[in-house]
Image (cartoon, grey):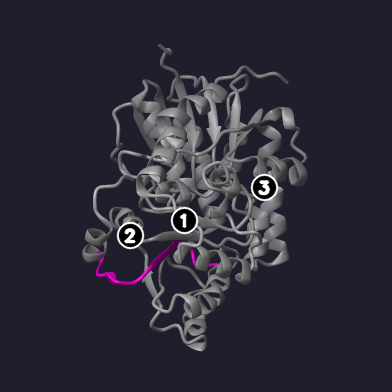
Amino acid sequence: MTLPTQLLLVGMGWFPTTPGGLDRYLYELMRQLAAQGDEIDLFGVGLPTISPHQAISLTNLADPTAPLLQRLWTVHQRFRHQLSQLPRPDAINLHFSLYSFPLLSDLPAGVPITFNFQGPWALESKQEGAKPWNVAFKHWIEDRVYQRCDRFIVLSNAFGELLHREYQIPWERIHIIAAGVDVERFKIDLTRQQARETLGFPQDRPILFVPRRLVQRMGIDVLLQAVVEVKRKVPDVWLAIAGKGSLRPVLEQQVIALGLQDHVKFLGYVPDDRLLIAYQAADLTVVPSQSFEGFGLILLESLACGTPVLSTPIGGMPEILLPFQPSLVTDTPDSDALATRLVDLLTGKIPLPDRAACRAYAVNNFDWKIIAPKVREVLLMPIDR
């Protein structure tokens, strides 16, 4: 039995108020560590006053809507005040560079600091069209934070390579640990027909489901191009897109221009309780990312709900799917490759894994009960530099 430890975690927002992979990951990790006996002090922006567990203490560092400089100053001041009233932590775990940066001068010496690297903040912004000065500022922030950290956790070998290449982090300080999924929440509890009826989805059409932020690098535009070709062989194919983002008006116009109005539905933001139903309603979840997909929690959630996932060969996604079924990864990220593989899977030319097989793969490999102890072991490693 492991002895309880005092862990100090610094995140971004609060899941599910601010849905997203980073916030979900931290929320689930925190809950699992607390359930296994650790004492958690979580710092973030926009945190609630009520904790989800008696072993978790929440400190809201700032109003997320405040101007950036004011927000960062408030983060610095509140962290310094609160830290003075807390017991010395056994380990510090940082999850977002922006809100870690104002804390650097106050982090206690001699305590191991681990950064969970879930994506290159600056490079992602550049890919999404940010101005050069904005990208440079974010890269500078990242560099300052990373210099203070003793080690890093990445979710895939692909992002380990990126962290090493772009930020010159030595491999001996990088630890690869996959993300986890809450298999007690994401599960099979409805038939596909029941799920479709609950959501008002068509019962008699093959359904593709895509839960993604509607921004450039997510590849929704590429998938829409693929659907044009898919419907030539699968005329009744239907694509449900969950998520919000700046590209929605552009994508809606693309749907009209491609003549896909009867084949595509934008669902907008889908709350968590409806998300797991949507996974179960689909024949196939599709993740058409074009860049910087370090892992892909969507893949785990869908598999845990019994629905197979088709992904592009980007980032860490192949590391999840190739050991399960190689045909669930396209040859290239372009629309032709997506269309070809979708047709093969939807027509049965390539058989899809059944619901039980998808569920078993997620449970046996990515249950948080398996993943959290691995993360904890890295957090508590002694400082070796």
The quadrant in which residue 55 appears is top left
Does the magenta portion include 218?
no
Q: Which mark is residue 141?
A: 3
**Placement of 165 over or under 346, stated as above or below:** above
Structural crowding at the residue carrying mark 2, measured as other residues with C-alpha within 10 Å and reported as few (<14), some (14–19) or many (≥20): many
Q: Secondary structure at mark 1?
A: loop
* Of 126 and 156, the residue lying toward us: 156
Task: Tell me where residue 144 appears, x and y as whole percent.
Answer: 70, 41
Q: Secondary structure at mark 2?
A: helix
Q: Please identify, in this view, whether the residue under mark 2 or under mark 3 is nearer the observer.
A: 2
Structural crowding at the residue carrying mark 3, measured as other residues with C-alpha within 10 Å and reported as few (<14), some (14–19) or many (≥20): some
Q: Residue at x 59, y 43 (%)?
A: 319
**Placement of 68 over or under 89, stated as above or below:** below
Residue 280 falls left or right of residue 261? left
Instruction: Quickly name the residue at label 1.
Output: 351
Q: Residue at x 45, y 55 (%)?
A: 352
Task: Tell me where residue 29 appears, x and y as whole percent.
Answer: 43, 35
Instruction: Quickly name the residue at label 2.
Output: 278
Residue 53 falls left or right of residue 99? left
Q: Could you give the CA–CA distance between mark 3 and mark 1, rounded to whole angstroms?
A: 47 Å
Q: Which residues are magenta?
A: 199-215
